[in-house]
Amino acid sequence: MVESCDSDLAQRIASGDRRALAQAITLVESSRSDHRATALSLLEQLTSVRREALRIGLSGAPGVGKSTFIEAFGSMLIEAGLRVAVLAVDPSSSRSGGSILGDKTRMEQLSRNPNAFIRPSPSQTRLGGVARRTHEAAVLCEAAGFDAVLIETVGVGQSETLVAEMSDLFVLLIAPGGGDELQGIKRGIMEIADIILVNKADGNLKSAAVRTCADYAQALRLLRPRQQDPEGFPKAMAVSALNEEGLKEAWSEISALDGWRRRYGFRHRRRADQARKWFENEIHRGLVEQVTADRTVRNSMAELGALVAEGKLFPANAAAKLLRQISARLAQ
Ligand code: GDP
């Protein structure tokens, strides 16, 4: 019965049915073990669909204009004949349970478009859990025939790295800065960004945006050239999401970079590396889950944890002790 249900669901997804897609994403987001089993069977069935969208990671600080950009950029892609999905990885939802990227009305026009699909961030207790769900949601969007999947995150902490690990390329949105400093952007994020868009290049912010863009272009030139990039990338550009200026140019650069990477096998290689990493993550997570499902292990862990907290045991020694106990139990 379950089998026939999810093969029906798989077919509906493959035919591009957005309601079926939404239903499937709810399934992959669920923490119920029966839902998980159905979700895995669904993902397996859909591997034969073998469709690939361009997955674009998009990050930026709150207020930089991410939703304005996605609304305008997504609508432009749809006008050009593409189907666009928008997913979110929201680090705040893992802390507070309330999602700041969750509000669909942020992209009102896009959310009403039949060729768009918008899904807010799943709420989870851990960012890793959010990332895993979003990665699976991206796979489902591809199976449903979307041409572009935008994966949005707020520019804090490790969420960018997680998003980069499920995207083909990464776009960083920044606001025009006052001076020539690089706005405290961490080196790590500069290294994963393929295209930096300085937004709000309009009105009295325009000249600041152009200056900021030049600063970033210079900083990017100092980065070590990457093997997977053609000449001129990573690149900084000034855009105005509000006035819809520079968006066509941004798309043309994104397409050029992706085209080049596909031609030389870099997109494929990046996906292969990512797939291996997701596989390893699943193993690590599953092992921890399996081991801690054992009550004796859980109790030992709590006791040793208390001793560590009291300073009576060194953390690494306590861990080694627990791992020896686990090995002994496994050998039984
Ligand atoms: P998010 O928090 O990154 O999603 O940012 P929003 O898209 O909600 O935008 C935050 C504010 O910046 C809003 O008041 C937008 O109208 C404004 N904004 C966004 N893009 C632009 C732009 O290109 N130019 C100007 N001047 N304002 C913009």
Image: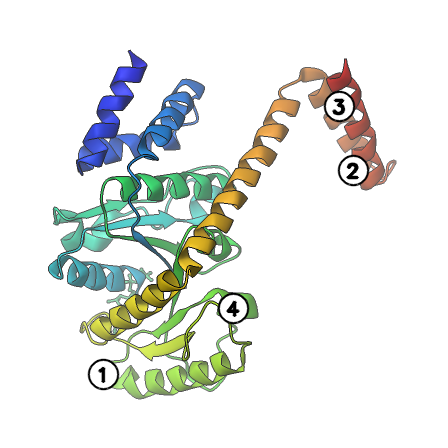
Precedes in sequence: disc 2 or disc 4: 4
Is 224 displayed left or right of 247 in the figure?
Answer: right
Query: Measured along the vertical axis of the image, is residue 128 above or below residue 5?
Result: below
Alpha-carbon neighbours of circle 3 within 10 Å: few (<14), some, or many (≥20)? some
Residue lying farthest front?
A: 264
Can you give x and y, in whole percent of width and height, for residue 71 in the image?
Answer: 21, 59
Q: What is the distance, in whole Å, between disc 2 and disc 4 at their CAs? A: 37 Å
Precedes in sequence: disc 2 or disc 1: 1
Seen at 31% across and 33% down, the residue is 46
Precedes in sequence: disc 1 or disc 3: 1
The front one of 263 and 184 is: 263
Seen at 53% across and 57% down, the residue is 157
Residue type at the position of mark 3? Ile
Residue type at the position of mark 2? Ala
Q: Which residue is mark 1?
A: 203
Disc 4 + disc 1, Cβ < 8 Å? no
Residue type at the position of mark 4? Glu
Q: What is the distance, in whole Å, between disc 2 and disc 1 at their CAs? A: 56 Å
Indicate which quadrant contains ligand 1: bottom left
Can you give x and y, in whole percent of width and height, for residue 160 in the image?
Answer: 47, 57
Q: Does the beta carbon of the residue at mark 2 sit less than 8 Å from ligand 1?
A: no
